[in-house]
Image: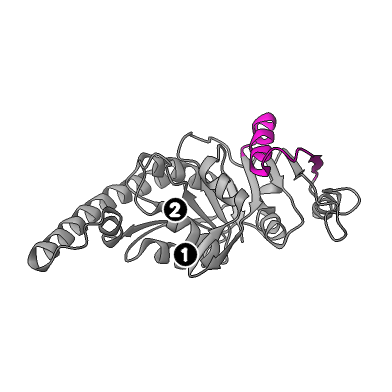
């Protein structure tokens, strides 16, 4: 399946411009429709700041002032979006500005796209409030894959050299399938099995060989590797190998479960969301 509908979540940060460049490049390469989504969510910054305790007219005035500021930012980002489309020669483009809860709105719009492009939450707190909540909502609530762009870096190419983190799970299988349009265009692709499971029903006699064969039947050529280093976290093994291969895309499954109404992320997912150094395609 080709990528024909791409959604990119935009905001007023510098990192948003990087996401737009990545999204426009993929849209051009795949001849895809590109939708830029800006969400005006004035409630989230107030809740994050703990400043929702005011009352009456003063609080209403604060809300409206924040809303007007956000609308002004949206207008600026829209102008940049349309200028970028024109500069890149992309005829299939659409601007969307929606008011509401950012996690809910982005997840809803992602359901009608082949791929949602989101920004990593800045661990230093320099990005927009609630970026992590948006990522989790899309990953676990949209039913679609998400391409997560690190908060630092430019990423002129995405998908030329692909590293696939494989552990024979449902989530990993879903991620590989969702990434097929990108893997098909790669100059090199590697399947890495970190600390393979040797129990019956695990990875098989040759870890990584089965998924490599499946991809070969799609006409894709991939290399299968395994690394055994129990003392090193799997996420670190993936990031280290991505650096060694000069990979510009990492494909992994996203793991999480709900406990007492709170989403608990898997260890590899949590680490990659915090420490990613290359764009990561995740699926759940």
Magenta stretch, residue numbers:
221-248
User: In terms of image quadrants, where is residue 42?
Assistant: bottom left
The correct choice, above or below, for 217 with respect to 155 in the image is below
Residue 25 image position (x, y, % from top left) = 52, 43
- Name the one closer to the observer, 128 or 94: 128
Label 1 neighbour load within 10 Å: few <14, some 14-19, many 20+: many
Residue 102 image position (x, y, % from top left) = 37, 61
Q: Name which residue lies at 39% across and 51% down.
A: 10
* Horizontal side, residue 215 vs residue 91: left or right: right
Residue identifier under label 1? 107
Q: Name which residue lies at 50% across and 47% down.
A: 23
Q: Name which residue lies at 8% across and 66% down.
A: 57
Mark 2 → mark 1, Cα distance in angstroms:
13 Å
* Horizontal side, residue 58 vs residue 172: left or right: left
Residue 190 image position (x, y, % from top left) = 75, 41
Residue identifier under label 2? 132
- Name the one closer to the observer, 22 or 167: 167
Q: Are marks 2 and 1 in contact (CB under 8 Å)?
A: no
């Amino acid at each position: 399946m080709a990528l024909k509908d791409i959604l990119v979540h935009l905001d007023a940060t510098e990192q948003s411009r990087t996401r737009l460049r990545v999204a426009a490049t993929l849209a051009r390469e795949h001849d895809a429709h590109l939708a830029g989504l800006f969400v005006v969510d004035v409630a989230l910054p107030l809740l994050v700041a703990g400043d929702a305790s005011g009352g009456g007219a003063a609080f209403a005035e604060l809300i409206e002032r924040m809303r007007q500021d956000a609308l002004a930012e949206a207008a600026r980002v829209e102008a940049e979006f349309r200028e970028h489309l024109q500069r890149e020669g992309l005829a299939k483009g659409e601007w969307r500005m929606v008011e509401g809860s950012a996690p809910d709105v982005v997840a809803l719009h992602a359901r009608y796209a082949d791929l949602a492009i989101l920004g990593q939450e800045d661990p230093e707190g320099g990005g927009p409030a609630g970026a992590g909540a948006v990522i989790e909502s899309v990953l676990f609530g949209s039913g679609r894959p998400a391409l997560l762009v690190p908060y630092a870096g430019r990423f002129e190419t995405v998908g030329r050299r692909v590293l696939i983190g494989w552990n024979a799970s449902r989530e990993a299988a879903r991620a590989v399938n969702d990434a097929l349009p990108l893997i098909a265009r790669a100059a090199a692709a590697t399947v890495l099995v970190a600390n393979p499971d040797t129990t019956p029903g695990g990875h098989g006699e040759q870890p990584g060989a089965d998924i490599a064969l499946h991809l070969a039947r799609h006409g894709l050529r991939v290399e299968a590797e395994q690394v055994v280093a129990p003392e090193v976290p799997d996420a670190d093994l993936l990031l280290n190998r991505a650096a060694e291969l000069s990979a510009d895309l990492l494909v992994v499954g996203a793991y999480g479960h709900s406990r007492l109404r709170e989403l608990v992320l898997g260890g590899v997912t949590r680490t990659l969301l915090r420490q990613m150094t290359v764009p990561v395609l995740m699926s759940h």
